[in-house]
Amino acid sequence: MTTIGNYKLIKKIGTGGFSKVMLAEEVSTGQKVALKLMKNSDTRQGIHRKNLFESEVAVLKELDSENILKLKDSDVSAPVTNTLGKVVDLSYIALEYAQNGELFDYVANGEKFSERTTRFFFHQIVDTLKYMHSKGYSHRDIKPENILFGSDFTLKFADFGFSTKKDICSQRRGTFGYMAPEVLANEAHDPKKADIFSAAVILFIMTTKHCPFIKADPNDKYYKLLIKGDIEQFWTLHENSNGESKQFSEDFKDLMTGMLSFDPSERFSLEDIQNHSWYNGPVAKKE
Ligand code: ADP
Ligand code: MG
Ligand code: MG
């Protein structure tokens, strides 16, 4: 069995755009960890993995929350011999293992969360963004693949490679489909406001199992209505999409609309969200 540093690899548990993640056991303690592995030699989209790694470790060191994966250990250079006998230089980040996997898998498998459970998860997303923002950080890539569940379905933010302390960013970072329009448009933007747009997309997906738009593209019928600010038509289309008629409550639509505002200066703040009537409805843990 392959060993990296003080860790025995057990099985692959994830892949991201920039890494492979393995379940591993710390030899000295027997404790399970998630080992996020990156090849130091690789570059992609002009982004050096080594920079991503260093930046992610630095961010994790400053954050301490029940809803953020805990950093256990890291190494910037761990040589490993691959199956072809070639030595590969890896960086690894040993993280608290989130045993219940990605939010993505639950929504992709069509699992219906009750409104109360959705709200319970959404509270944790908002609380965690509030905590990160209070520490000066934006996340910049929240999406169901980067939101994990620990034991008891405690929500855990993962993947801090793009997180920054900058108040204004000019580089486009994140994932299409979750990116705020000002990020997509390559404008100088406030990344904390962009996080709120991404959180809205996640709330929409948890509630409907669909994306609020098919493509973040001015020709997309939903996106077009958001750009125009024709919110009524946006909701009418969604309520009659996929051959079924659905009803969203007025307070849900109002919260969503405020968070999905195309104009970042009009977009709801985290405080607006926390004061909203939908937010303050009943919660229930996931069964
Ligand atoms: P990338 O930056 O390459 O996207 P991530 O940090 O998002 O890498 O990790 C990729 C995937 O690996 C995640 O989407 C998740 O499925 C899995 N993963 C990452 N960290 C953990 C963890 N601590 N526990 C369980 N699974 C994890
Ligand atoms: Mg990721
Ligand atoms: Mg990443």
Image (cartoon, rainbow, N blue to C red):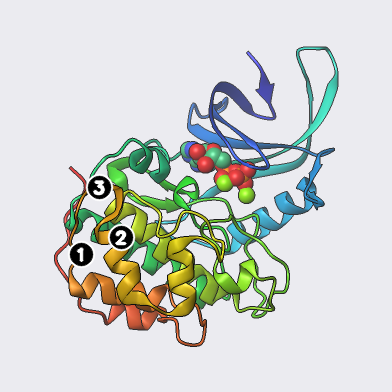
Q: CA distance from mark 3 to mark 1?
A: 16 Å
Q: Is mark 2 within 8 Å of ligand 1?
A: no
Q: Quadrant for the C terminus, please.
A: top left
Return the residue found at the far bottom: 265
Q: CA distance from mark 2 to mark 3?
A: 10 Å
What residue sits 67% from the left and 76% below the top?
Answer: 166
What residue sits 27% from the left and 72% below the top?
Answer: 253
Front tag of 2 and 3: 3
Return the mark for residue 19. none
Instruction: Name above or below for residue 20 compared with residue 238.
Output: above
Badge count? 3
Q: Position of residue 148 (x, y in %)?
A: 42, 46
Q: Position of residue 113 (x, y in %)?
A: 23, 48
> Mark 3 = which residue?
243
What residue sits 65% from the left and 54% below the top?
Answer: 161
Instruction: Name above or below for residue 105 compared with residue 201.
Output: above
C-beta proximity under 8 Å, tags 2 and 1: yes
Front one among 202 and 152: 202
Question: Which of the 4 image quarters holds residue 19?
Answer: top right
Instruction: Give the residue type that dot 1 points to.
Output: Phe
> Mark 2 = which residue?
238
Question: Which of the 4 image quarters holds residue 175?
Answer: bottom right
Front one among 248 and 146: 248
**Left-right relation of 78 to 64:** right
| Local SS, label 2 | helix
- For label 2, the crowd category at 10 Å Cα-Cα, with few meaning under 14, some 14 to 19 and many 20 or more, is many
Front tag of 2 and 1: 2
Instruction: Give the residue type that dot 2 points to.
Output: His
Instruction: Name above or below for residue 108 compared with residue 113.
Output: above
Instruction: Give the residue type that dot 3 points to.
Output: Gly
> Mark 1 = which residue?
248
